[in-house]
Amino acid sequence: MFSQKNLSILIPSIGEESSYKLFDAILQFIVSNFQICERIELILLVSGNCCNCSSINYDYLPPNVRIISRAERLGASTARNHLALASSGNFILFCDADSYIFSRKSFSIDLLNVLTIVSGSPRDCCYIFSDSTAKPLSPFSFRLTEWNFIVSRELFISSNMFPAKIGVGSSSLAQSGEAQFLFNAMFKRNTIFLPVPPLFAHPALGTSSEAAELLFENKLYGYNFGASYATILMVFLCFSSLSLYHLASHCASTLILFFQLPMGFRAKSAMLRGRIHGLISSIFFIVRGKSINYFYTCP
């Protein structure tokens, strides 16, 4: 009988080589440190593409490390929800398939510090990483992503998890915004900021190179559609000071985009078109009187 784990690290994947590299890197830290190994769970969910891109032999994984394969390709939100339900840790932390360890040099120490914090935590809270020294730690001074928070498994599930009908891989035009749905629900519960760097990071987040990459992959429109769509819906369906702040920030950034339109017209116009379309679609959704539960029910 194995002891209850403090933390489950969960990686959704569609078979990307980067997801196996991340899994392998975390695995090495787990097996090399008994203090970590006995308190953590690591799960990789590979859906739609079970190609093993790793050179490591997975026949001898520790009992707290698993790879789950699904023949059906799952969207990112659905995959994360499946991972949460399959996990057994008191707290869960998500990574993206192309996330990476923020600091390999201090990862073991950082992870042990986090494990110490969550081991004595109540089962109804969410911890958010923020090492910003420029502003006070607040829900209004950072960008929530799918990998910079640790949430109680019980709280995550009781908050309806990620909306299955929004996000990358979903059938919706909204290819982003699922983190807003989740955080607005958690904001009304028990959110605590950790004044420490995150355990994991993501390449090119929020940069011009990210926008260029999304444009090349024909995702820039859908991401900005989702940004407007989720922002407007949260104000009307899950109103809080946070949703109001997100609306003000989104309006300000959209106004800036208009002024930046002559510079990089192709990318900026795709972003603006996506945001305007997202606004119109969210208004139609609200006028039709649909419930927020629509986004959490699978077709």
Image (cartoon, rainbow, N blue to C red):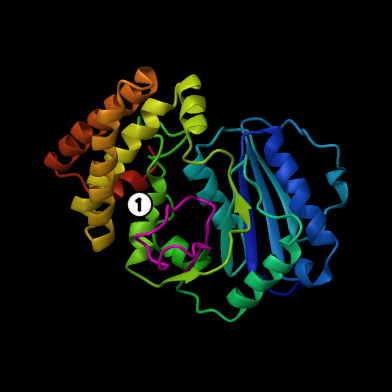
Q: Is residue 47 above or below residue 194?
A: above
Left or right, residue 297 beside residue 96: left
Residue farthest toward the top in the current orientation of the protein: 266
Check if residue 146 falls in the magenta segment: yes
Q: Is residue 169 above or below residue 230?
A: above
Side of 126 relative to 274 (left or right): right
Is 5 left, or right, of 272 in this rendering? right
Give the farthest residue toward the left.
Answer: 287
Q: Position of residue 180 (x, y in %)?
A: 36, 51
Start and end of the magenta stretch? 126-149
- Residue sitting at x 60%, y 76%: 117
> Where is residue 290 shown, x and y percent of the image?
19, 44
Give the residue at x 24% y 46%: 233
| Relative image position of residue 125 (x, y in whole percent) | 46, 72
Q: Quadrant of the C terminus?
A: top left
* Mark 1 residue crowding within 10 angstroms, few (<14) / some (14–19) / many (20+): many
Q: Nearer the viewer, residue 256 or 232?
A: 256
Q: Report the front residue among 250 and 157.
A: 250
Give x and y (percent) for residue 197.
Answer: 59, 61
Label 1: which residue? 181
Question: In which quarter of the view is residue 282 placed?
Answer: top left
Q: Residue flagged by tag 1: what amino acid is it?
A: Phe
In depth, the one of 57 and 226 nearer the eye is 226
Q: Residue at x 48, y 25 (%)?
A: 212
Quadrant in the rendering for residue 184: bottom left
The total number of labels drawn is 1
Residue 166, quarter of picture: top left
The question of residue 17 being in magenta is answered with: no
Which image quarter holds the N terminus?
bottom right
For the stretch drawn in magenta, the main secondary structure is loop
